[in-house]
Image (tube, grey):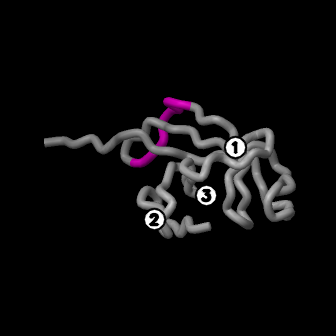
């Protein structure tokens, strides 16, 4: 008997190599990032399945902005590490397990 372990997994990709000014906290810690989804086999990403939209994620305050600098809706809170949608009462991300509280 032989089993294949595969599926779709998200990967957060940093776009560009210079940080931007965060509209909320004022630190140069906001990066333009995109969450892409890859088809993986045995936890190795093989090829992209879906390309995510670019967002500005601040590593200092944890807020997420669209490309124009507007804060995304509070109901659309995302994990700062994997970029997946979270409820407002999560301290740890249920998808990646990292502390995602703001």
Which mark sits nearer the N-terminus, 1 or 2? 1
Q: Which residue is mark 1?
A: 55
Label 3: element kind: loop
Q: Residue 40: name its quadrant.
A: top left
Q: Which residue is mark 2?
A: 97
The C terminus lies in quadrant:
bottom right
Spatial CA distance of label 3 from label 2 is 11 Å
Would you say residue 14 is visible in this rendering? no
Would you say residue 92 is visible in this rendering? yes
SS majority, magenta = strand
Report the magenta residues as a range.
43-50
Which of the numbered marks, if any, corresponds to residue 98?
none
| Residue 40 among magenta residues | no
Label 2: element kind: loop
Which residue is found at the position 42% from the left and 60% from the top?
94
Tell me the crowding category of disc 3: few under 14, some 14 to 19, or many 20 or more residues within 10 angstroms, Cα based: many
| Residue 47 among magenta residues | yes
Residue 10 vs 50, above or below: the answer is below
Which residue is found at the position 42% from the left and 39% from the top?
8
Q: Please tell me which residue lies in front, 40 or 24.
A: 24
The N terminus lies in quadrant:
top left
Which mark sits nearer the N-terminus, 3 or 1? 1
Tell me the crowding category of disc 1: few under 14, some 14 to 19, or many 20 or more residues within 10 angstroms, Cα based: many
Where does residue 78 sit, x and y in percent of width and height? 56, 53
Q: Which residue is mark 3?
A: 80
Q: Residue furthest left?
A: 1
- Relative horizontal placement of residue 80, taking residue 61 as reference (left or right): left
């Amino acid at each position: 008997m032989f089993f294949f372990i595969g599926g779709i997994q998200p990967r957060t990709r940093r776009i560009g190599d210079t940080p931007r000014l965060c509209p909320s906290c004022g630190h140069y810690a906001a990066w333009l990032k995109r969450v892409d989804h890859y088809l993986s086999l045995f936890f190795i990403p093989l090829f992209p399945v879906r390309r995510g939209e670019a967002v500005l994620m601040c590593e200092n305050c944890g807020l997420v902005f669209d490309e124009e600098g507007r804060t995304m809706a509070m109901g659309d809170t995302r994990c700062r590490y994997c970029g997946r949608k979270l409820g407002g009462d999560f301290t740890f991300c249920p998808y990646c397990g990292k502390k995602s509280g703001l």
